[in-house]
Amino acid sequence: MADRERRMFREQVLTYAYILLYIALSSGQIFFNKWVLSSKEINFPFPLGLTLLHMVFSSVLCFLLTKVFKVMKVEDGMTLEIYTTSVIPIGAMFAMTLWLGNTAYLYISVAFAQMLKAIMPVAVFILGVAAGLEVMSCRMLLIMSVISFGVVVASYGEININWIGVVYQMGGVVGEALRLIFMEILVKRKGLKLNPISVMYYVSPCSALCLFIPWIFLEKPKMDALETWHFPPLMLTLNCLCTFALNLSVFLVISHTSALTIRVAGVVKDWVVVLFSALLFADTKLTIINLFGYGIAIAGVAAYNNHKLKKEASRAISDDSQQTQLTATTTSSTSEI
């Protein structure tokens, strides 16, 4: 009994450690990217180039871990048809999300960008309804209204609002919503379930290619003309490694807990980013209206997550019930034979 209690205690400690690691890495990566893009010491205002480096680094590291050192395994089931119809759109939307989201940091504060991200469930739901994956209901309409109202109030309380940054951030939100829709289609309609490492293995090269093409035309000429930018190799490697470690931490949290835990941890991370950014960056000026509106939006996000998890639980129970009935029918038929 004592050994069992010690094992359970170690597992609980390990689980909390993974959750804290995810929150720390997710928050730290946001602060790290903001510092790299806006810091005068580094002077690297190229969000497209930074995102491209992340994807190239992730592609190389995924290949080394899965094919060379074979520390991790890529799940089977990928076909050319699935890759062209699902993985490529997911990779393109992932590239769009990271590019536009990082670009927004050049114009708006980290805290305000995080507040605008709270509108994500609304974009996912609207696109889900359009794709036939979601059904409009009075309850969901109320939840979406609460989230939207909270984001509007938070935006109204922003002192130094920059509409260019808002447009970039909203573009990143739409890209992420489309990515999630394509992921759901990949799972529901294609029947393929991949762990985060497998997803990054397939998606990262595609995202890198999608970023490389606009980088040649949009940022490379600027980098050639502006000779004052500087990015130390050690800092570059650390930044890319932090991005990859974040994706790995998501895998660890999900594998040791549940979807609910990662969503709750995500809400905690959002508040950590909003509050700590006010201490770390001079361009962040939080107001009571900011925090009040963001609090309303987060309450709506929590209600949305709760609704989704209940829906997933009821679907799982329904699937188990159908499987049990099928097994009973098969057994009965066998007995009659």
Image (cartoon, helix red, strand yellow):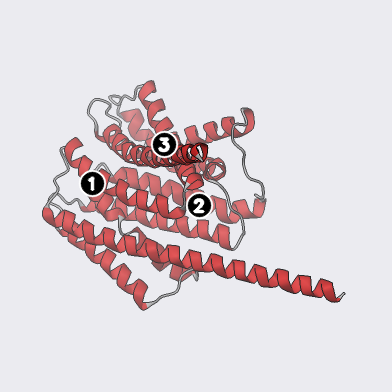
Q: Is residue 274 visible?
A: yes
N-terminal label among 2 and 1: 2
Q: Is residue 332 left or right of residue 50?
A: right
- Few, some or many residues within 10 Å of mark 2 (<14, 14–19, 20+): many
Per the model, the C-alpha gap separating discs 2 and 3 is 18 Å
| Gap between marks 3 and 1 measured at Cα | 20 Å
Which amino acid is tagged 1? Val
Residue 243's mark? 3
On screen, residue 329 above or below 163:
below
Secondary structure under tag 2 reads helix
Label 1 element class: helix
Residue at the far right in the pictured view = 337
Q: Nearer the viewer, mark 2 or mark 1?
A: 1
- Image spot of residue 175 (x, y percent): 41, 54
Q: Is residue 330 left or right of residue 112?
A: right
Mark 2–mark 1 distance (CA, rounded to whole Å): 28 Å
Position of residue 325 in the picture relative to residue 240 (left or right): right
Query: Which label is found at residue 90?
Result: 2
